[in-house]
Image (cartoon, rainbow, N blue to C red):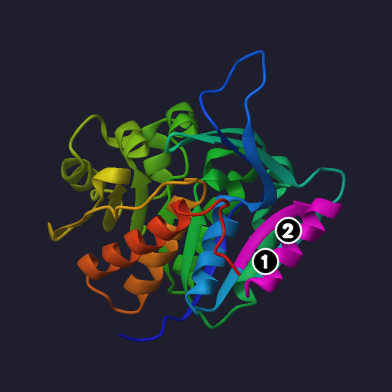
Amino acid sequence: MTHPARVVVVGDVITDVVAVLSGPLAAGSDTAAEISLGGGGQAANTAAWVAAQGVDVTLVAAVGDDDAGRDRIAELDRAGVDCAIDRVEGVPTGMVIVLATDGERTMVSQRGANLRLSAEHVERAIAAVPDAGHLHLSAYTLLDAGSRGAGLRALAAARERGLTTSVDAASAAPLRRVGAAAFLGWVRDVDLLLLNADEATALAGGLDPAAQGRALSATARRVVVKGGAAGAVWVDRTDTVSVAPARRVTVVDVTGAGDAFAAGLLTAWLAGATPAAALNRATDLGALAVSTIGARPRP
């Protein structure tokens, strides 16, 4: 095992308003909840979890030139993330309202400044970290037309510099909107593609996870399908299949669990871990994330 080189994470920064509901949502009335406000966003969360593993990490993103944006950057600084974050005037920092109950979460999103992430900013930020060895992209950047150029440029710039690459598929509904063929064209030949069960179904159809991984390995060199309580599956082009069971923990809030999983997987794999060991590390961090409220590691 070796210490990984710097990881560059490209994607979104969000303010999360998380409401962990006491029971089913009472539409048109009141539902008791435990409510918290703090940093979120798939890319920002993953970067924070990577930093918590002792790996150097740079986050490339955009926030509004507002108090929320300054707060989000300050949180990431404290978490040990190097921030290459553009402050965009005239638009708010992104915000998500998360309703969490029964091991599920529903999100209401305002993408805000994340839609203004530019290819030029991404290019400059990647050029400024010559010690980087890997680039991880949140697919939200690709799924929004406003930031798609930045996501495509991130992958291209990484390849030009010899970095390995990974993409987290992000969310099933926008994947269906853009279409499987378009998305798979954008991420062709990435080194690692991460998906949950719904995202894998959107891209590969209703197969079992190993079969979905095999189908998608025609696009990505390695594919990891996360099945929540069913565990996770790794498939690569040599037909290697590894499976890791989910950890048995009390689920408090699933927000950020996939981001913690991604960080565990990446830092282990980049250090030279086997697929099985990388999956086990990923499921350990995912279990830690669902055991607490919020999307980031505890200080």
In this image, 6 relative to 37: left or right?
left
Q: Which mark is residue 220?
A: none
* The quarter of the displayed image where residue 182 is located: top left
**Where does the image place residue 11, in percent across and percent down from the top left?**
59, 54
| Span shown in magenta | 59-81
Quarter holding the N terminus is bottom left
* The quarter of the displayed image where residue 103 is located: top left
Q: Residue at x 54, y 79 (%)?
A: 56
**Where does the image place residue 16, in percent across and percent down from the top left?**
66, 46
Q: Which mark is residue 72?
A: 2
Query: Which residue position is annotated with label 1?
Result: 76
Can residue 270 be seen here? yes
Q: Nearer the viewer, residue 97 or 233?
A: 97
Whether residue 44 is in magenta: the answer is no
In this image, 225 relative to 146: left or right?
left
Q: Residue at x 36, y 46 (%)?
A: 195
Marks 1 and 2 in Cβ contact (< 8 Å): yes
| Mark 1: amino acid | Leu
Quarter holding the C terminus is bottom right
